[in-house]
Structure formats: structure tokens, C-alpha cells
Image (spheres, coloured by chain):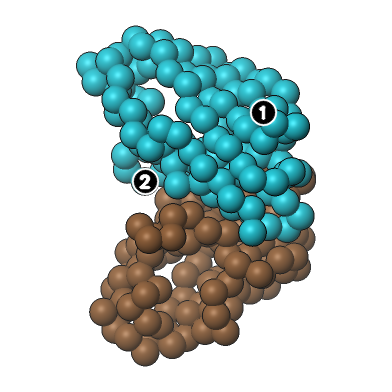
Chain colours: A cyan, B brown
């Protein structure tokens, strides 16, 4: 099946710093999503981005489908950005999640 | 809208018992998803429904798992009989429109099977 790899596995930032999270996938995909799971376990959909670039406030995402990767950018990080960021790819009816990047933003 | 509602929030049961998890999607959403999250396997999509009809259940681990959606406002995930390896957090999510577009997640049910 399709493989999804996220990097880095862990990231520690000082509040105000910028960061880039990466998601590589092993095959062409129909769709890709980014999710955030906060420290209390709540999952939130951030972006639905099979290709191109989207922005939502301090967050933006870019997917280059032909090169099989997606990037999530977090600018001016805040402590509330802490948690785990997952990417998930869809191929047909198969949806696979990466193992996530655990982000800790320190005040 | 109250968002996606799941019940119970926590369930502790003994091996061999039947477990039923419940989900109420956001009103008007026509897709419903069940996910499982464990330390070992991470997040997995178990099954999803469109207009109450199961579309893909290839992620359901075994015949012990079954899911139903009798109407647009209610779905259940049942495990019978339960085993310790079923211990996980089970999330329900719903969306409007295309299958994986802007899913809204419930708070999850933490299941512990002793």
C-alpha cells in the first residue's frame, strides 16, 4: 500500500518562530489533507489540498503532487499551535495517515 | 450546531463483552467516517458512509467489527466480542460534499478492554 512519511517527527520552537513540516508519499494520490491534534486529543482538519497552495491565517500548505510531497508552513508560531500534525493521503478509497510531527511551542 | 457528538466518552469493558460506540454527525452532513487511533498503528480509517450507505469498509479490522447508520443523524460502531487489542480512541467525523472534504471530528471515545 501507499507509504506516508512525515518529517521531522518532533519539533520544538520558541513562540514567534516559523516552521515547515513535510509529508512525503510513495504514489500518486487523489487527495491530501493536513490535520492538527491538540494536546487534549481533539482533531481538526486544517487543509484539503490535493495540489497547489492554500493559506489560512498563519498557516499555509503546498502540495506538489508530481513530486509526491506536501509542506505545511506555520508562521509566527503560538503556544496554541502545539500538538501533533498529521497528513493523510487518499488513493481511491484507501486513506493513509502519516505518523505525525509533534510540535511543541514554548513561550 | 453542537458539532459531532460521540458517546460514551470513555468505556472500560472486559474481554469478550460487546461494545457499542455511538455518533451523531453534524446536521446536513452526508458523509460519516469512523477512525481508530492507537499508539502502535496511529490513525486508521475504519469505514465511511455516504447518505447512510457504507461506501468502503476495507479498513474494518475483523468480522468482530460492524458499523451501521440507520438514519442521517445516527451511527454505531460495534465490537463483538471485544479484545484487549481493540483498546484505542475511536473518532467519528462528518463532512458535507466530497468524501474527505473538511471533515469535522467528534471528541472521540476512549475504549479500554481489560
Q: Label 1 marks which chain's residue?
A: A
Q: Residue at x 37, y 75 (%)?
A: B85
Of marks 1 and 2, the one in the foreground? 1
* A69, above or below A13, in the image: below
Observer able to see residue B7: yes
Q: Between residues B33 and A54, which one lies in front from this camera angle?
A: A54
Q: Residue at x 50, y 15 (%)?
A: A58
Marks 1 and 2, how far apart in space?
26 Å
- SS assignment at label 2: loop
Do pointers 1 and 2 mark residues of a single chain? yes
The answer to whether residue A81 is left or right of residue B66 is left
Quickly name the residue at label 1. Answer: A63
- SS assignment at label 1: strand
* B96, above or below A53, in the image: below
Observer able to see residue B52: no
Relative image position of residue A16 (x, y in whole percent) = 34, 10
The answer to whether mark 1 and mark 2 are in CB contact below 8 A is: no
Q: Label 2 marks which chain's residue?
A: A
Q: Which mark is residue A20?
A: none
Quickly name the residue at label 2. Answer: A41
* A50, above or below B33, in the image: above
Relative image position of residue B114 (x, y in whole percent) = 26, 79
* A13, above or below A100, in the image: above
- Please state, as top left, top right, bottom left or bottom right, where the N terminus of chain B lies in the image: top right
Question: Few, some or many C-alpha atoms within 10 Å of disc 1 (few <14, some 14-19, many ≥20)?
Answer: many
Question: Few, some or many C-alpha atoms within 10 Å of disc 2 (few <14, some 14-19, many ≥20)?
Answer: few
Q: Residue at x 47, y 86 (%)?
A: B80
Mark 1 vs 2, N-terminal side: 2
Relative image position of residue B68 (x, y in whole percent) = 63, 74
Amino acid at each position: 500500500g501507499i507509504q506516508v512519511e512525515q518529517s521531522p517527527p518532533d519539533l520544538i520552537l520558541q513562540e514567534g518562530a516559523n516552521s515547515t513540516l513535510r509529508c512525503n508519499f510513495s504514489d500518486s494520490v487523489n487527495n491530501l489533507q493536513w490535520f492538527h491534534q491538540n494536546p487534549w486529543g481533539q482533531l481538526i482538519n486544517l487543509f484539503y489540498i490535493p495540489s497547489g497552495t492554500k493559506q489560512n491565517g498563519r498557516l499555509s500548505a503546498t502540495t506538489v503532487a508530481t513530486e509526491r510531497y506536501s509542506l505545511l508552513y506555520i508562521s509566527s508560531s503560538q503556544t496554541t499551535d502545539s500538538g501533533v500534525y498529521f497528513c493523510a493521503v487518499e488513493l481511491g478509497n484507501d486513506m493513509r495517515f502519516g505518523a505525525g510531527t509533534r510540535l511543541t511551542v514554548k513561550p | 450546531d453542537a458539532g459531532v457528538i460521540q458517546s460514551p466518552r470513555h468505556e472500560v469493558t472486559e474481554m469478550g463483552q460487546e461494545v457499542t460506540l455511538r455518533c451523531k454527525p453534524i446536521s446536513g452532513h452526508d458523509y460519516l467516517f469512523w477512525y481508530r487511533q492507537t499508539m502502535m498503528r496511529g490513525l486508521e480509517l475504519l469505514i465511511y458512509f455516504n447518505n447512510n450507505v457504507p461506501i468502503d469498509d476495507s479498513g474494518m479490522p475483523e468480522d468482530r467489527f460492524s458499523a451501521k447508520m440507520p438514519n442521517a443523524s445516527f451511527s454505531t460502531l460495534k465490537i463483538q466480542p471485544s479484545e484487549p487489542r481493540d483498546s484505542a480512541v475511536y473518532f467519528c467525523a462528518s463532512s458535507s460534499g466530497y468524501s474527505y472534504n473538511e471533515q469535522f471530528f467528534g471528541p472521540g471515545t476512549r475504549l479500554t478492554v481489560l
